[in-house]
Image (cartoon, grey):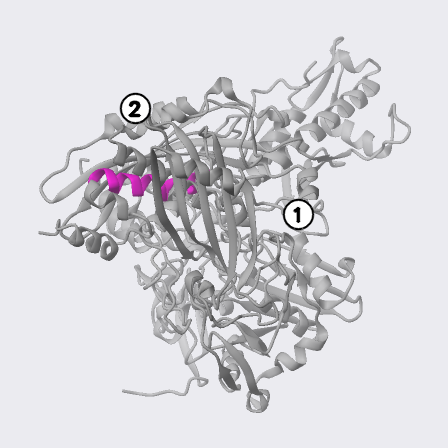
């Protein structure tokens, strides 16, 4: 029987549990930590992109007012070990990264740190550090890295190529299809580097207490356990000497997913000083020296027969890892996933991807919301639309005719990815219907068009056997602990983290649902390695709710059973004869005992059946048996101004399936936020560099993120195919919205201005790029 | 024009959220740093230090300003209001409540600045469209896609005391 009398908490638009305090100005971000006794740090960074630091003179800086410590590369290097990468690309020879090096590989590379009594004093002193460099020519962008005779970032490797992997059908089989197919669409497609640009930049406060030999870190991070693991490794101390806590995190989007070199330096400084040291990144550091994302270039082909049936798809994909392959989920992982997920929701006779990665003189690239799947979708959906354009077919019909149908699922792709369930054509059909309703005509010099893009995405990542098979050192499993405290309140702990996505609220709903108590009784506590269950991947990969929620679902079920048994003991009856009604357990005879009294008796150890279980706490480790796949079709209507080249997204709609949705308010917020981030990449965002490797998008004046007027009110329709693999039927959706927008918007521009369709191969579609294409097509009048 | 040394301490008097502040501040200290680290009101956030993102917006004599583009000494003789002043002990302001109900915040970092701009819009009696297009247009939010914030503006302006001032839409 069920213990609960309350209405289901699943599917409820519950406002978020942290909003009251945040709206009152009581958020608690890393720069909000009390400053009593804190020293402040400034990072000394390289002003050149490539070369060797020949001289580092910190004498004047050490004498500057308020300065406590100045460290240069020769001071730091002997104290630290290199941090190992978590996922290597086949052939990768350099398998770790250095906290500091005299070899400079990007502008902004940290070379040292100044610690002083104030941030201003630290920055003043950092200006006094004299540095000389033996400059070398910079490698800017993948084509430069590939060029014969290119300067080498790692001469010992003999090439700028990190490694290479082919997935899916063998190359010879693919080539034989392309050689004989009736039609081959062949495009070179580019996605530039972009900046995650969370509104809160990175930041860290580190304190070393000589008395306890403990390093306590507060960090704006998605991955406290990974930071602990990497700091301990780098500083040659035990992991149990390091505690990492992430309080409120002001956005992350895949960036704050590893220890960064500058953060490592702060920990070194704190340890040397035996003090509390704070470093808060500023916006220009965030835009130029922090890790970036995406950065891919591909030659991609789609082969079709004379009836428009897809025969083969192949992407020869080249990713820009930057100066080194970052650890955690960074490095080449996103490029590998772009290739592995190239097929999307369609059938082919052959499919595959050849994935290469390249070192360049730019900051490393990290995970970025969508993790390669935006890039894969961009490639595939531009090819599909271009095929429809060249063959004179309706793009919706071409998609439908080649799409995997509901009765063909489960389906294993040529690259070995096991799609689970859902109805991909139904989402396409509904999105096409919405497009037909919303289509508006061109007017004067403004052309309008509708474009669609369909995708399947990996969520709830991932089974540990898969990680072991591919030697990816991420903890795919996730765990949750639920505790009924001695006063009857309920506390939930998990390894997943809060980065603004609303996970505390969703887990509150799951706990309340399964335990049968009001959500107000539940507190979800995340982000502190001293209390959280282990997770080195935490809130990434659209996994937090699906996996921590599944673990919590099971843990709460067990704990509910134990509470019923304890209540039955107190009421001198059997658990089957007890029900929870409000705050009271009732027996059939009408006797009652309060939830709180049962909790108290439980912690006293009274009345239990099981002699070995006392604490009212359950922990469940959940290792998903397979990946859960979300899917969607997005639609965009754009207006293209032929005189200015400006593209306005006038309408945007999403038909998606993320399994069982726990909180539609939060789910829609994630989708809309994701779409906006995708729209930013489609229209505005690009981390640019000049030919010497100097970053040229260094502030929000030249790195353009979307503002309100860029984003229409977005229509969302949910389908709900419960995951067959996950208790609760959950799938993930944090990345979903981000994946299709560049393709959908690109396809909409192509529909509006078919004359330039073939040339819509590089994002962002900013006015100068579009105007140039319009001008070349003779459309600017 | 009078020049000052950056490290020079200068005496200022200001009122912050109904509390009088009389004391010395460094000549070069930003108003945002003063509010956060001297007055201890950490609800005001610094997102870019270039006046673009709007997270640091506070009211100076009732007008929204970027506190990262002002020096603390420029608050001398003025009244400063920050996000901490908006809610009552028990209840959120009407717009704060609408932001909660419409899911107008995610990570919450940009939120205080938006709240201050909207507080100014309400006091000035700006219509919803002005609040939505011009006031919200001056803020960057990286999480929400703005849709929930616009919904909160519409909800708040179309109900309650501002409704009669809202133009027909």
Q: Is disc 2 placed on a helix, strand or loop?
A: helix
Q: Nearer the viewer, residue A359 or A675?
A: A359
Q: Which residue is mark 1?
A: A474
Residue farthest top in this picture: A589
| Residue A433, label in figure | 2
Q: Is residue A659 visible?
A: yes
The image position of residue A586, as x and y in percent, is 72, 15
Residue farthest right in this picture: A611
Q: Is residue A739 magenta-colored?
A: yes
Exactly how many numbered labels are in the figure?
2
Q: Is disc 1 placed on a helix, strand or loop?
A: loop
| Circle 1 chain | A
Q: Quadrant of residue A71?
A: bottom right
In the rendered structure, the answer to whether residue A349 lies left or right of residue B137 reads: right
Question: Which circle's residue, 2 or 1, is located before the other in the chain?
Answer: 2
Residue lying at 41% horizontally and 81% vertically, measured from the top left: B27
Residue lying at 22% horizontally and 46% vertically, measured from the top left: A756
Q: Nearer the viewer, residue B43 or A170?
A: A170
Q: Quadrant of residue A619?
A: top right
Span shown in magenta: A736-752
In the rendered structure, the answer to whether residue A444 lies left or right of residue A349 reads: left
Measured in 3D between alpha carbons, the distance from the residue under mark 2 to the one under mark 1, in whole angstroms, is 41 Å
| Circle 2 chain | A
Q: Is residue A734 visible?
A: no
């Amino acid at each position: 029987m069920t213990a609960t009398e309350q209405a289901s908490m699943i599917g409820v638009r519950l406002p978020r549990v942290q909003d009251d305090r945040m709206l009152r100005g009581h958020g608690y971000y890393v720069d909000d930590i009390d400053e009593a006794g804190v020293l402040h740090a400034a990072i000394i960074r390289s002003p050149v992109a490539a070369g060797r630091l020949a001289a580092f003179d910190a004498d004047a800086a050490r004498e500057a007012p308020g300065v406590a410590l100045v460290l240069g590369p020769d001071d730091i290097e002997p104290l630290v070990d290199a941090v190992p990468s978590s996922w290597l690309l086949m052939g990768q020879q350099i398998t770790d990264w250095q906290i500091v090096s005299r070899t400079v590989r990007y502008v902004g590379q940290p070379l040292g740190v100044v610690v002083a009594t104030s941030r201003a004093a630290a920055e003043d002193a950092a200006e006094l550090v004299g540095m000389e460099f033996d400059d070398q020519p910079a490698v800017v962008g993948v084509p430069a890295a590939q060029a014969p005779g290119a300067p080498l970032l790692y001469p010992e490797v003999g090439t700028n190529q990190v490694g290479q992997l082919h997935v899916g059908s063998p190359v010879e089989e693919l080539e034989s299809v392309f050689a004989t197919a009736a039609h081959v669409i062949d495009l070179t497609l580019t996605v530039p580097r972009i900046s995650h640009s969370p509104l809160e930049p990175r930041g860290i406060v580190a304190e070393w207490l000589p008395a306890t030999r403990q390093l306590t870190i507060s960090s704006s991070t998605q991955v406290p356990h990974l930071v602990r693991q990497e700091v301990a490794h780098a500083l040659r101390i035990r992991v149990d000497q390091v505690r990492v806590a992430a309080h409120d995190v002001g956005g992350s989007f895949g960036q704050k997913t590893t220890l960064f070199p500058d953060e490592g330096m702060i920990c070194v400084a704190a340890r040397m000083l035996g003090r509390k040291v704070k470093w808060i990144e500023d916006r220009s550091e965030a835009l130029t020296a922090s890790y970036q994302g995406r950065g891919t270039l591909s030659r991609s082909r789609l082969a079709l027969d004379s009836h428009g049936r897809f025969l083969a798809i192949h992407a020869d994909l080249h990713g820009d890892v930057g100066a080194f392959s970052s650890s955690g989920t960074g490095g080449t992982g996103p490029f590998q996933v772009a290739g592995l997920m190239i097929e999307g929701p369609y059938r082919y006779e052959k499919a595959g991807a050849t994935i290469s990665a390249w070192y360049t003189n730019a900051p490393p690239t990290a995970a970025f919301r969508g993790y390669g799947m935006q890039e894969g979708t961009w490639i595939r959906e531009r090819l599909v639309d271009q095929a429809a354009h060249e063959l004179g077919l309706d793009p919706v019909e071409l998609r439908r005719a080649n799409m995997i149908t509901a009765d063909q699922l489960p389906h294993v792709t040529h690259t070995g990815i096991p799609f689970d369930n859902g109805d991909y054509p139904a989402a396409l059909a509904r999105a096409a219907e919405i497009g037909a309703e919303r289509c508006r005509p061109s007017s004067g010099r403004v052309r309008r068009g509708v474009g669609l893009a369909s995708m399947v995405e990996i969520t709830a990542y991932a089974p540990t056997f898969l990680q072991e098979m591919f030697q990816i050192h991420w903890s795919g499993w996730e765990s949750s602990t639920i505790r009924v405290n001695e006063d009857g309140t309920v506390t939930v702990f998990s390894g997943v983290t809060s980065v603004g996505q609303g996970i505390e609220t969703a887990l509150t709903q799951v706990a309340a649902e399964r335990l049968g108590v009001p959500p107000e009784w539940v507190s979800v506590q995340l982000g502190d390695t001293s209390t959280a269950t282990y997770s080195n991947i935490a809130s990434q990969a659209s996994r937090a709710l699906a996996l921590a929620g599944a673990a919590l679902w099971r843990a709460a079920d067990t704990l509910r059973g134990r509470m019923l048994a304890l209540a039955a003991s107190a009421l001198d009856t059997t658990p089957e004869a007890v029900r929870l009604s409000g705050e009271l357990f009732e027996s059939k005879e009408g006797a009652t005992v309060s939830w709180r009294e049962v909790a108290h008796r439980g912690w006293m150890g009274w009345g239990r059946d099981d002699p070995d279980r006392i604490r009212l706490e359950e922990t469940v480790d959940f290792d998903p048996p397979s990946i859960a796949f979300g899917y969607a079709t997005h639609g965009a209507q754009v207006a293209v101004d032929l005189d200015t080249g400006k593209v306005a997204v006038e309408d945007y709609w999403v038909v998606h399936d993320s399994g069982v949705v726990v909180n539609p308010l939060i789910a829609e917020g994630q989708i809309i936020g994701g779409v906006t981030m995708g729209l930013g990449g489609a229209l505005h965002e690009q981390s640019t560099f000049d030919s010497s490797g100097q970053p040229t998008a260094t502030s929000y004046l030249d790195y353009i993120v979307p503002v309100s007027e860029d984003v229409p009110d977005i229509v969302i329709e949910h389908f709900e195919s419960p995951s067959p693999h996950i208790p609760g039927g959950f799938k993930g959706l944090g990345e979903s919205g981000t994946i299709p927008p560049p393709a959908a918007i690109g396809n909409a521009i192509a529909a509006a201005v078919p004359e330039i369709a073939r040339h819509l191969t590089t994002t962002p579609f900013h006015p100068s790029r579009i105007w140039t294409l319009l001008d070349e097509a003779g459309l600017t009048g | 024009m009078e020049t000052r040394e950056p490290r020079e301490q200068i005496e200022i008097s200001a009122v912050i959220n109904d509390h009088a502040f009389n004391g010395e501040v460094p000549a070069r200290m930003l108003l945002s740093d003063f509010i956060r680290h001297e007055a201890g009101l950490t609800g005001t956030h610094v997102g870019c230090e270039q006046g673009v993102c709007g997270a640091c917006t506070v009211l100076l004599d009732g007008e929204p300003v970027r506190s990262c583009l002002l020096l603390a000494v420029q608050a001398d003789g003025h009244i400063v209001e920050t996000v901490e002043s908006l809610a009552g002990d028990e209840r959120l302001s009407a717009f704060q409540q609408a932001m909660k109900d419409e899911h107008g915040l995610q990570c919450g970092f940009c939120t205080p600045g938006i709240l201050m701009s909207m507080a100014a819009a309400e006091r000035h009696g700006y219509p919803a469209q002005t609040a939505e297009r011009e006031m919200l247009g001056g803020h960057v939010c990286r999480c929400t896609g703005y849709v929930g914030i616009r919904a909160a503006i519409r909800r708040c302006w179309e109900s309650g005391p501002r409704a009669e001032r809202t133009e027909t839409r």
